[in-house]
Image: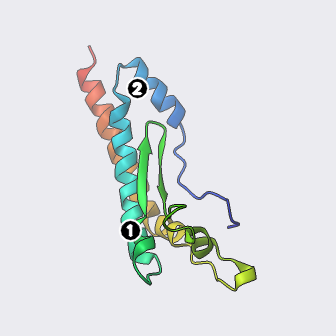
Amino acid sequence: MAAGTRAGVEVEGAKELRRAFKRMDGNLADLREVHRDTAELVSSTARTLVPVRTGTLRHTIRESARNIGSAVVAGRAGLVPYAGPIHFGWRARNIEPQPFLYDALDKRRDDVIGAYQRGVGKLVKRFDRDAP
């Protein structure tokens, strides 16, 4: 993948799911927890795949979750500005890409899909049970 591209798992019908939650007076924070759980699967795997010299880059791998999705990122501009060149490579500097975030997602893709299926299934059952 070229620098600046995004890899991910797209949940078909996610927008409709959020709308349905709102109609059912569901708490979208519950959906955020499903997103967080899936992001943690990828971030924990990425920490095992990231190239390590000092460990600083590994310690910047983190997940974020919102109502609409989640992300796993690495690096911080002031602390680890080299995260991008390590992940995507830098031809002019003879740095080969080591796409540890993409590789982590590839390794955990089935787990992520399963976690979404289980998490959303539990929420649907709970709302179905609580419905009048």
Callout 2 crowding tier (Cα within 10 Å): few <14, some 14–19, many ≥20: some
In this rendering, position of residue 23 left or right of residue 9? left
Q: Residue 60, how many percent across, how many down?
A: 42, 64
Circle 1 — which element? Answer: helix
- 28 above or below 1? above
Q: Residue at x 37, y 48 (%)?
A: 36
Please name which of the two marks, 1 or 2, marks the residue nearer to the observer: 1
**Residue that sits furthest to the right in the current view:** 92
Asked if residue 30 lies left or right of residue 76, the reply is left
Q: Amino acid at mark 2?
A: Phe
What type is the residue that disc 1 sits on? His
In the depicted structure, whether residue 33 falls above or below residue 126: below
- What is the spatial separation of the Cα atoms under label 1 and label 2, in whole angstroms? 35 Å
For label 1, the residue is 59
Which quadrant: the C terminus? top left
Look at 50% across and 61% down and name the residue there: 76
Counting residues from the start of the chain, the first of labels 1 and 2 encountered is: 2
Q: Is residue 25 above or below residue 14?
A: above
State the image coordinates of residue 26 (x, y, percent, origin top left). 34, 24
> Could you say which quadrant of the image residue 32 lies in?
top left
Report x, y in % for residue 77: 55, 61
Where does the image place residue 91, in percent across and percent down from the top left? 73, 80
Graded by Cα atoms within 10 Å as few (under 14), some (14 to 19) or many (20 or more), the crowding at tag 1 reads few
From this viewpoint, is residue 74 visible?
yes
Q: Which residue is mark 2?
A: 21
